[in-house]
Image (cartoon, helix red, strand yellow):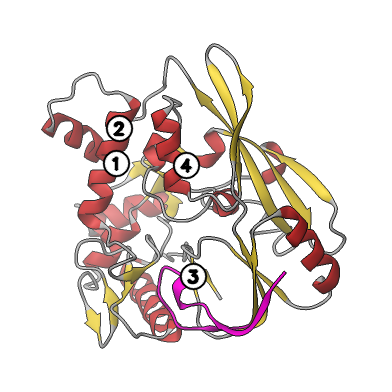
Amino acid sequence: MTIINNASLKSFNTFGIDAKAQSYCDINDLDTLYNVLKKHYKTPLFVLGGGSNMLLTKDIEALVLHINLKGIEIVSDTDNSVIIKAMAGENWHNFVLWCLEHNYGGIENLSLIPGNIGTAPIQNIGAYGVELKDVFVSCEAIKIDDQSVKTFTNSDCNFGYRESIFKQGLKNQYIITSVNLKLTKTKHQLHTDYGVIRNELDANSIKAPTIQDVSNAVIAIRQSKLPDPNEIGNSGSFFKNPIISAEEFSELECNFPDVPSYKISDEAIKVPAGWLIEKAGFKGKRFNDYGVHNKQALVLVNYGNASGKEIFDLAQLIQKTVKRIFNIRIETEVNII
C-alpha cells in the first residue's frame, strides 16, 4: 500500500484539469482497499474511478482512492443468457468490446461511453434508448465506515434517469467493487429506434443488423460529434436532457415550432438539451482555453489549460441563459467537485 502526497490528478480525469490530491492511493486489489479503509475510514476520502464524469473545480483535500480492480468472469450461463461479473476498475468500452467478441448482447448501444464499470451504476449510464438498469442484476459494494460488504440488487439501486441511490441516499457511503450484468446469447433485442442509428445502418446498407453492427453504428455516431478526451479535455455530455410536462412542451412548441422532442409518457416530454444550448447561441463558442464543442453543444471542452472553475462558470452561464430563453432548467450530468 503506497500513498503519494500532493499528487496531480491531471491524467486521472478526462477534462485534464490539473487539480492536486492531498494524498493518493492506487487500489489494485480488494485486500489493499480493505486495509486502506480500516486505517483511514475516519479521514476524508475521495473515490476515483475512470474520472470521466466529473469536473474538478478545486484541489481535493482528502485521500484519493483510485479504484483499479480488474477481472471479468461468467457467473451464470444458460442457452439464452449469461450473467457476467466485472470488477469496478475495468474500462467500460473495453468491456463492451469483450462482450461483443463473445456475442453477448444488451449493451451494444452503450459503446464508447467513457468511464469504468464501477461508476456505471452510480450514473445509470445510458444512450440511444438503452440504460444500464436494463441489464443490471446486482453490484457488490464495501461500506466505507465499517468495511461491511453488501450486494445491491436492481431494485435496491433506485435507478432513474442518470440517477441511482449511490448519488442520493447513499452518496459517499459505499465503494462499488464489482457489477453483475445479464446479457443475451441468442435472440438479441436490438434497439435501433433512434433515427441516427437507423440512418447510420442504412448508409452502410445494413438491413438485418447484428449487435456488432449496432455497436459500430453507435461508435461512428459518437466519434462524428464527440471529441476524444485524449485530444481535447471533456467529459462527454455535460448536461441532462430535461423532461418537462406536456403542458410546458405545448407552450415551448408554440414559441419554437422546430423544437425536437421524445415522448416519455402522456404527461412527460424529453427535450434535447443540446438543441436548447445550440439555440441559445453557445455551440462552438470559445472563451480563452475552454468552451462549447463545435459539433455537439452538450459537450464542454478544455482546450489545454483551463481551470475547472472556468468551465463550471461557463456551465452556469449556459444554464441561466437557457432558463431565460426557454424557461427550462437544465441540470448537469457531470459531477461538480
From mark 4 to mark 3, how far is it between C-alphas?
19 Å
Sequence order check, earlier mark of 4 and 3: 3
Asked whether 91 or 328 is in front, the reply is 91
Residue type indicated by callout 3: Phe
Instruction: Check if mark 1's residue and mark 2's residue have beta carbons within 8 Å.
Output: yes
Marker disc for residue 168:
none
Give the magenta part as a residue range: 1-22
Q: Is residue 9 magenta?
A: yes
Q: Which residue is mark 1?
A: 218
Residue 12 in view in this figure: yes
Q: Which residue is mark 3?
A: 12
Number of numbered callouts drawn: 4
Q: Which residue is mark 2?
A: 214
From mark 1 to mark 2, how far is it between C-alphas?
6 Å
Image coordinates of residue 147 in percent, x first then y, are 84, 58
Image coordinates of residue 98 in percent, x first then y, are 44, 36
